[in-house]
Structures are given as structure tokens and as C-alpha cells.
Image (cartoon, rainbow, N blue to C red):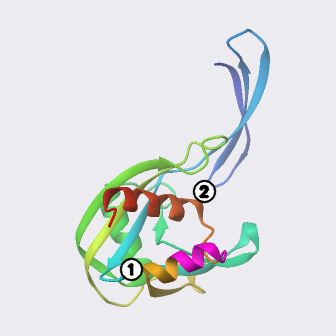
Amino acid sequence: MERVSSRVVYQNPWMTVREDEIRRPDGSPGIYGVVEKPDFALVMPRWRDGFWLVEQFRYPVGRRAWEFPQGSWGHGAGGDRAELARRELAEETGLRTARLTHLGHLFEAYGFSNQGFDVYLAEDLDEGEPDREPAEQDMIHRAFTDQEITTMIRSGQIVDAPSLAALTLHRLADPR
């Protein structure tokens, strides 16, 4: 496909929405709505029997749910992705890691967004106090066993697509 034109239809410090006129391979015209967002890091804090998760209210879907710690650099900021993963882990859970392993890079919703994310496995954890942003003030964190996580997926307590994709990457890397 070829982009013929593009225009920004909405923009704020966290995202840009644009509408692109395109030409398909057969020459026919079309349009795409594209959400541009910065990439983020997702961290899987592993303890002996499972993982630490965070729970928070997600406004767009109107509910609380459990997920792995994740986030992007703030507006205008940037840096090393592993550094971002460590920062998000400490900020949301208070956990610090001695060992961080990159498991892969995925896209959250490539049918309409360019946002990707890097998945990291964090091991050898030390506990500390979270340093959450104001938007995360209702967040809680807790350790769960692998079996509890499976039950939570089946019962709809874990519905975050990046977290579920991260679990798949982890199981492919460590199929025990």
C-alpha cells in the first residue's frame, strides 16, 4: 500500500491520531486511521512460584484488572529500554531486579496503532517501596503463583493483551 496523504485529526501529549488516504496495490483508494503512541516496556517480575502483578482501574474499559508492570517514557523523554523496564518495575511495585532478560518485541494493536513493546523477565528481586505517579494512586501489587495466574486468566481477572502475550513469550522461553 502507498500513503497518498496524511492529516493529524487529534493530538495530546500521549498520542496522535492521524487519517491516511492510501492507494491499494490494485490502485483502489482507501483510508486508515492510525494511533501513534510511544513504545513501552512490560516487565514480568518472577519469584520462585510465579509472578508479581499490578492491579489498577483502566478508564477506557471502566474496570480494574491485573497486569504486568508496564509503561513508557514521559512526553519528550527517552532512553534505554532496559532502563525504562527497571524504572517501571520500581515505580509500580517497589521491586528492584539484579537480572533483566529481554524476551522479545511485540506490537500491541498493529491493525490501528504503531505502538510496540519490549517484554523483560526480571529475576533476583529485592522489595522496596513503590514511587507511583499520580495517575497510579489506586494501583496495588501482589505476588501470585503460576496456578493462580492461570485461574485469573480463565476467570477474566487478567485481560490485558500485552500481559497475556508476555506470558506466551515466557512459556516459549521456559516451557517447564
**Res 94 quadrant in image:** bottom left
Residue under the point 71% across and 16% down: 24
**In this view, 71 is above or below 149:** above
Residue under the point 60% across and 86% down: 138
Image quadrant holding the C terminus, namely bottom left
Instruction: Give the secondary structure at mark 2.
Output: loop
**Res 63 quadrant in image:** bottom right
**In this view, 13 is above or below 71:** above
Horizontal and vertical percent position of residue 45: 36, 75
The residue beneath circle 1 is: 50
Image quadrant holding the N terminus, namely top right
Q: Residues within 10 Å of mark 2 (few under 14, many from 20)?
A: few
Q: Residues within 10 Å of mark 1 (few under 14, many from 20)?
A: some
Residue under the point 39% across and 61% down: 171
How far apart are labels 2 and 1 at the CA level? Answer: 32 Å
Residue lying at the far top of the rendered structure: 27
**Which amino acid does the dot numbered 2 rest on?**
Trp
**Is residue 64 visible in this depiction of the protein?**
yes
**In this view, 85 is above or below 46:** above
What's the magenta region?
A: 150-156
Horizontal and vertical percent position of residue 109: 61, 48
Q: Which mark is residue 82?
A: none
Q: Which mark is residue 14?
A: 2
**Which amino acid does the dot numbered 1 rest on?**
Gly
